[in-house]
Image: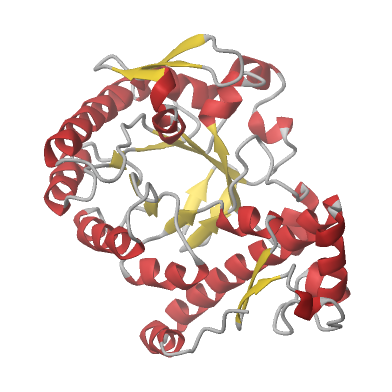
Amino acid sequence: MLHTPHGDVETPVFMPVGTQATVKGVTQRDLIQDLDAAIVLANTYHLFLRPGHELIRQLGGLHRFMSWPRAILTDSGGFQVFSLSHLRKVTDEGVRFQSHLDGDTHLFTPASTVDVQLALGSDILMTLDECIGYPATYEAAREAMERTVRWARASFEHYRQIEQPAGALFPIVQGGMHAGLRAACAAKLVALDADGYAIGGLSVGEPRPVSMEIVEAATPLLPRDRPRYVMGVGLPEELPEYVARGVDMMDCVLPSRNARNGCLFTSQGRIVIKQARYKDDAAPVDAACGCYTCRNFSRAYLRHLFQAGEILFATLATIHNLKHYLDRMRQIRHCIMIGTYSEWLDSVRSEPVQLE
């Protein structure tokens, strides 16, 4: 169980991604009433640039600004800055970058990213880290890892000078795809005695099995009594595998992004809704799903919306995909509670996946 100023969060948990203070395609009412999402993720980089953290602070913080009464995690912006390779310069001081919106120059430092997230009113804050791409040499990964550790220490020094900060601060384990560097980073970050820990730098182009191997190497080195968060993962079939390796928290844009592109996750595999076979299909997307979309609409109707370019398709598809993810996490938590997780995991591993 994760305790936050805006409510308890049962773990393991999947967090829908609300980059710009909104989960694309769905309303907060959908997230609460139909999906019962306990926590969402928002993006420090994007909200810093637009509309600005000080404006959000003036308007009562991110919870009031986006009318979200439950928990919010914000990332530090490190991954977004990493993706702007031609617009940024990394030094020991921090990251100087140009806005992708207007070209203005800004500086993220370990202290400033903490201050921005506190202004947003985040329940869980992340330290500034240096994310490195794949492939990367050992030396490049080592330099990025050591800088990430120095930044984490500076972040915590600043954070702990603040009287009663509202949110918990998590450092991020880096080290590329080198298990030894991940182990070294984890050992140094554990010394910070943080409320939780994250594993970052995944989903940067590496093969999926490599992601799993890195998580498997790093997770056992982090305290078992603190939440362990793997950033930016994964596919529905990967969620139980990460949990089996000790992961408590995950997030990923896949359920919403794939939904908008017409790919729907179901208990029988994936549906690519534009295919002609669904033109007159009166069945719901997934007969085993109880989401609003599956209770009310057919595959034929959803295909029609997608082919017509109607905005409603994105909403209905995103509701379904998020429900699929969140229901899978509920099933995982239930099996853990009753002590049958190992048996359940074996059963899902052996299930044939039908791709449609």
Does any portion of residue 162 appear in the rendered image?
no
Relative to 340, 148 lies left or right: left
Q: Is residue 302 above or below residue 205?
A: below
Closer-to-camera residue (301/348): 301
- At 85% from the left and 75% from the top, the residue drawn is 300
- At 49% from the left and 75% from the top, the residue drawn is 332
State the image quarter where residue 113 is shown: top left
Q: Is residue 11 above or below residue 104?
A: below
Relative to 192, 315 lies left or right: right
- Residue 323, image x and y in percent? 67, 66
Relative to 296, 340 lies left or right: left
- Residue 349, image x and y in percent? 41, 84
- At 43% from the left and 69% from the top, the residue drawn is 238
- Residue 32, image x and y in percent? 73, 55
- At 12% from the left and 35% from the top, the residue drawn is 139
Does any portion of residue 202 appear in the rendered image?
yes
Check the image and name the residue furthest to the top: 104
- In the rendered image, the quadrant that contains the C terminus is bottom right
State the image quarter where residue 221 is shown: bottom left
- Residue 220, image x and y in percent? 22, 60
